Image (tube, rainbow, N blue to C red):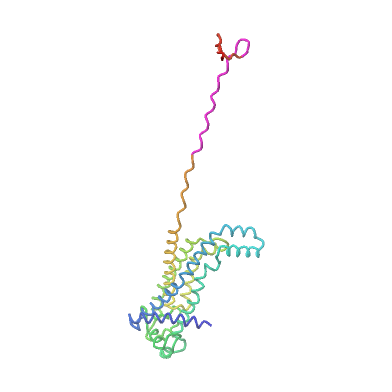
Amino acid sequence: MLDPVYYAVSAVMRAWYQLFALLLGPADGVAWALSVVFLVLTLRALMIKPFLSSLRSARVVRALGPQLAELRRRHAHDREALVRETRALHAAHGVSPLGGILPALLQLPVFVGLLHVLNGFNRPGLTFEQNAALAHYAFPPADVRSFLEARLFGVPLSASIATPQDLLDGFGGSVERWEVVAVALPLLLLAAVATHVTARHSLAQNPPDGPAAAVLRWTPWILPLGVVVGGLLLPFPVAILLYWLTNNTWTLVQQWLVHRRTAADVPAPPRAAPAPPPPAAPDPPTPRPAPARGASGRSRRHPPGPRPRRRRRR
């Protein structure tokens, strides 16, 4: 069912291996490690456009937060109406709720394919010579032998902390479990730290809201815990730990660059003009002096004495 994914992953990995084998030698473990690293870089380079689309969708959905909250309040007892109105709101703004998780969905088949390809180099129940004589997806037998003989810090790339000793013996040479732990454990811790930093930076740039906000705030701790538990208990090879470390490092750098660029492109809000001072209260009117009153109590408009004569107009 997933054979097309397995062949595609192994073909890209083999192309990078052939390039680095010309520079470092066909049996060099660093050439195989770099082929895994550049497999991740190839995938992430193809996913730059979906990442930008998911970033836009996340920002639009966050801007629609007040309207979504109003819809939840209005249709608190009508689930169908809430779903219908929410879809209409998203469609009106050209976003999809799945847009934010599209990059993760695209990476999942590649992760599964790489895990299957790496674990398939050393088939259980076969000796080293039997495995080295079989082709493995896009890898011919010569490349399979080279991979089984390659070492990174003295450890096969397909070895994991959970690999039983009989499979470790199938890689040829003497490989002890403590040697695998000494290489895999630091890579595992680095991958967990990179996962924590990446998830924390993502939450800082896109604060969660809505009913799932309480769960999403714990992802910087849940995801690294899953990496540590999976690396200790599940057969995750050393090459998969390189995949995790490279992938999370790319994600962290990409988030930092994109958010810095978009923050620089957004103009700063205009400064509000200072409010004019309130108008001064008008001066109270000056009271006019009351006219003097005579002895009879009537007011006298003119002071005592002869009144001025009016001139007659001719």
| Main SS of residues in magenta | loop
Residue 222, placed above or below residue 149? above
Q: Please indicate, yes or no, whether residue 154 appears anywhere in the rendered image.
A: no
- On the image, the x and y values in percent for residue 266 come to 45, 58
Q: Depth check: give the residue in front, 89 or 102.
A: 89
- The magenta stretch spans residue 279: yes
Quadrant placement of the C terminus: top right
The residue lying at 53 percent from left, 59 percent from top is 63
Extreme-top residue of the structure: 306
- On the image, the x and y values in percent for residue 106 come to 50, 74
Quarter holding residue 287: top right
Extreme-front residue of the structure: 314
Q: Depth check: give the residue in front, 286 or 176.
A: 286
- On the image, the x and y values in percent for residue 175 come to 39, 82
The residue lying at 44 percent from left, 82 percent from top is 11
- The magenta stretch spans residue 55: no
- On the image, the x and y values in percent for residue 275 come to 49, 42
Q: Please indicate, yes or no, whether residue 70 appears anywhere in the rendered image.
A: yes
What range is drawn magenta here? 277-298
* Figure disc tally: 0
Residue 227, placed above or below residue 306? below
Q: Give the left or right position of residue 82, taking residue 263 as reference.
A: right
Quarter holding residue 79: bottom right
Q: Depth check: give the residue in front, 155 or 261.
A: 261
